[in-house]
Image (cartoon, rainbow, N blue to C red):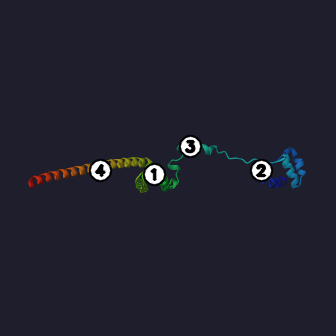
Amino acid sequence: MHKTIASKLLNCGKRKIWIDPNETKNILFTDSRNSIRKLIRDGFILKKKDKNHSRNRIRSRKEEIKLGRHEGLGKRKGSKNSRYSIKLIWIIRIRVMRNLLKRLRNSSKLNRHLYRSLYLKSKGNVFKNKKILTEFIHKAKNEQKRKEEFLDKFKLMREKKKINIEKKKSNFNSRMSEIVSDILV
């Protein structure tokens, strides 16, 4: 009876109640909840601590799993996709590439045209990983520089040709005017 009342007061089961063996006579004469509350306050009735499971085995097993143990064919229950989803791999991969592209665009290392083409290519599974994407970016930038240099050279050559044509025309016109003047005189 005393254990039942004490368990209700302490919000636990009867097996968690400890009664002081030296004070059993005094405790037997108590019959009210108030007197049991007083005994709890005095420390003659206590609530036992919870028993804890030792997690040592689990910790050591987790460390072994980190090292690659206990993951062999015999331990696998689900399919390859259920253990590590293909979609999840894709999501991680595409996020990494898109973050790289955004970072480069914001730091103005990529113009918007190149950014858009690379974004769509990464969406279309052209790049296997971040490393290949960065290599492609370097190649594309070098190609762009080469095109710009080639266009500059081409413009210079075109200007030179125009100047040469103008010179030839002026020379031709001056010669023709001399010839015409000689003929007329």
The residue singled out by tag 2 in the image is 16
Instruction: Name the foreground residue: 25 vs 49.
Output: 49
The local crowd at label 1, few if under 14, some if 14 to 19, many if 20 or more residues have their Cα within 10 Å, is some
- Looking at the picture, how far across and down is residue 103, in whole percent? 48, 50
Q: In which quarter of the image is the N terminus?
A: bottom right
- Looking at the picture, how far across and down is residue 69, in whole percent? 53, 44
- Which secondary structure lies at badge 4? helix
Marks 3 & 1, CB-CB < 8 Å contact: no
Residue at 35% from the left image edge and 48% from the top image edge: 143
Mark in front: 1 vs 4: 4
Q: How far apart are marks 3 and 2 (CA)?
A: 37 Å
Q: How far apart are marks 4 and 2 (CA)?
A: 94 Å
- Which secondary structure lies at badge 3? helix
- Looking at the picture, how far across and down is residue 182, in whole percent? 10, 52
Residue at 77% from the left image edge and 51% from the top image edge: 15
Mark in front: 3 vs 4: 4
- Which secondary structure lies at badge 2? helix
- Sequence-first disc among 3 and 1: 3
- Sequence-first disc among 3 and 2: 2
Q: How far apart are marks 3 and 1 (CA)?
A: 43 Å
- Sequence-first disc among 1 and 4: 1
Amino acid tagged 1: Arg
Residue at 62% from the left image edge and 44% from the top image edge: 57
The residue singled out by tag 1 in the image is 105
- Looking at the picture, how far across and down is residue 80, in whole percent? 49, 54
Q: How far apart are marks 3 and 4 (CA)?
A: 67 Å
- Which secondary structure lies at badge 1? helix
Amino acid tagged 2: Lys
Question: Which numbered disc covers residue 64?
Answer: 3
85 displayed left or right of 167? right
